[in-house]
Amino acid sequence: MRTLVGHVAPGLDFRLIGLWHLFNHIKLHALNPTFYTAPPWFPTSKDKYLKLFLIMAALINSLHLHGTLHWPRPPLDL
């Protein structure tokens, strides 16, 4: 994460997932405000596990980039 993209892309992913959950919680609460319970998972209509696969792909990509780009580490400039 030495570049701006390495910080912005994961942050944007987290923001989009958070907005997805916020929208779904508001929708569920508006449908039935007296008996609202918060589910931990909101599957998409096309693919039930799409978000899970995207999170797994991002994790694998992060591990791959961390293992290939950050080693050997440069010496510390003190």
Image (spheres, helix red, strand yellow):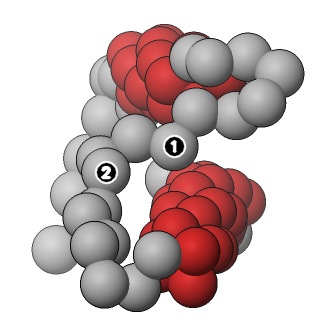
> Which residue does the image show at 31% across and 84% down from the upper left?
34
> Could you say where residue 10 lies in the image, as x and y percent from the top left?
56, 55
Q: Position of residue 69 (x, y in %)?
A: 52, 26
* Residue 23 drawn above or below residue 73: below
Residue 9 is situated, as x and y percent measured from the top left of the image, at 67, 57
Q: What residue do we see at 25% from left, 64% from top? A: 37
**Between residues 13 and 77, which one lies in front from this camera angle?**
13
**Count of number-bearing discs:** 2
* Mark 1 residue crowding within 10 angstroms, few (<14) / some (14–19) / many (20+): some
- Res. 52 in view: yes
Residue 70's x, y, as percent? 41, 31
Q: Is residue 54 visible?
A: no
Q: In the rendered structure, are the residues bearing label 1 and label 2 in contact, judged by CB atoms less than 8 Å apart?
A: yes
Residue 44 shown left or right of residue 34 in the figure: right
Question: Which quadrant of the figure has residue 15?
Answer: bottom right
Q: Which residue is mark 2?
A: 39
Amino acid type for the residue under numbered disc 1: Phe
Badge 2: few (under 14), some or many (20 or more) residues near its Cα, within 10 Å?
Answer: few
Q: Is residue 51 left or right of residue 47?
A: left
Looking at this rendering, what residue extends furthest in the right direction?
Answer: 46
Tell me the residue at 40%/85% (across/down): 33
**Image quadrant in which you'd find residue 63:** top left
Amino acid marked by disc 2: Pro
Tell me the quadrant of the picture where the C terminus can be found: bottom left
Q: Is residue 7 above or below residue 53?
A: below
Task: Find the distance from the CA under tag 1 to the CA under tag 2.
Answer: 7 Å
- Front residue of 47/55: it is 47
Q: Is residue 52 left or right of residue 3?
A: left
Residue that numbered label 1 is attached to: 42
Q: Give the residue drawn at x 52%, y 69%.
A: 28
At mark 2, the secondary structure is loop
